[in-house]
Image (cartoon, rainbow, N blue to C red):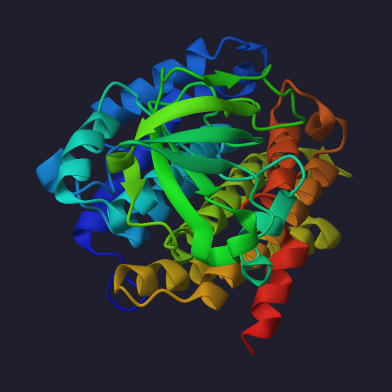
Amino acid sequence: MLGFTLSEEQLAIQKLAREFTGKEIKPVATKFEKDEEGKLAEGIFKKTAEVGILGLPIPKEYGGSDASNVECSIVLEELAAGCGGIATAIGASWFGQTPIMLAATPEQRQRWLPPLTRDGNLCCMAMTEPAGGSDIENPHMHSRTIKTIIRAAGDHYLVNGTKIWPSNATNSYLYTVVATINPELGDEGSCLIVIPAGTQGLSFGKPIKKMGMDADCNSEIFFDTVRVPKENLLGKVGDGAKLLQRTLIYNRAGAGAIATGIARGAFEIALKYAKERTVAGKPAIEHEIISAMFADMATEIDAARLLYLRAAWFNAQRLPNMAWSTMAKVYCSDVAMRVTTNAVQVMGSYGYSREVGVEKYMRDAKIMQIYIGANELTRQVIGESL
């Protein structure tokens, strides 16, 4: 990215993602709600691997494209313009593999990264716990609310605890788990450990039915004396809090991109409708009050895009800024909620109809104000940075 212009390579990646979304995602976007076994979404994840989207951020030596946070964010916006749930599942997979990119040894990278570029294999960031909510992301809590415990047993760790709400909960290849050796030690006891799917003692609750994001699978994850080799620890005990905060910086920019894509998807459908719908003898868009609403929506979407691109650009320069990533997440998610609500409003009963699909964007948008740090908490993070 140079100035305000995407490079030729970035434009090509954007075009790839936009065409993929138009061909593979938009035609089935309203069908994920009935896809209870996740087969439809699974097929799309496999196709993202085939065209090179799934492995974008992974280094080339492990089969990926070595794309920066900018390229990944651009792609997430395009995917979310088709379906927020698909974009969230893929963004969450990149979220789960970010600590591996940051802290894994060469041997760990060789073992875990290549499979994440193929076959639709996803990664899960197992972070939030039933009693803690956003506390686990709050640096002021110093990891004291983490209840997932690892205990040394020879050359293994035994993992016990429960996680809730993670994306890709039951359909992941790898689980990056936020844990501690002792909550009383605070950050000094924190750690991240990687657990492969199918490990004995790893089990799941029932899929959680939600108001939106149907293509993204959520449930409780149970760790019942899960035996994991010590070599699966990322870094060392005490590194967990620092790794998690660095991971949040990179991925809040991505959340901003997804929110922007959701807003844009709803906006584009509503704009097409307003140009074709005749009200009082002329297209709805020619009425001053409707035209002003679209002007505001277009302005907010562009402002949101600039915010997430700024955060992603600094992340790509290895100059991550928590405040800027968090600003992007907060503003973009609020824009997504406003724009999707207004898109439904200007379309009236058609907007409210599930057949048209605009209400889906509105339902998908709501969680963007909640996940990867509820906006109430993340506004506090921004305020403290001033």
Q: Is residue 373 visible?
A: no
Residue placed furthest toward the bottom? 386
Residue 129 horizontal/vertical position (percent): 68, 42
Nearer the observer, 229 or 1: 229
Where residue 361 sits, quadrant-wise, is top right
Give the image quarter of residue 276. Answer: top right
Q: Is residue 263 left or right of residue 132?
A: left
- Compared with 43, 362 (above or below) is below
Q: Which quadrant of the rendered structure holds the N terminus?
A: bottom left
The one nearer the camera, 42 or 184, is 184
For the point 29% across and 74% down, the residue is: 317
In the visual, does 109 lie left or right of 187? Answer: left
In this rendering, position of residue 42 left or right of residue 333: left
- Of all residues, the one furthest to the left in this rendering is 61
Question: As rendered, which of 371 and 24 lies closer to the eye?
Answer: 371
Q: Residue furthest front?
A: 154
Q: Residue at x 72, y 72 (%)?
A: 379
Image position of 35 with respect to 211: above or below: above
Q: Could you tell me if residue 360 is visible in this image?
A: yes
The location of residue 271, given as percent across then percent down, is 66, 46
Image quadrant for the C terminus? Answer: bottom right
x%, y% of residue 369? 72, 54
Name the residue: 67% across, 72% down.
Answer: 140
Query: Percent x, y for residue 146?
Result: 64, 51
**Number of callouts:** 0
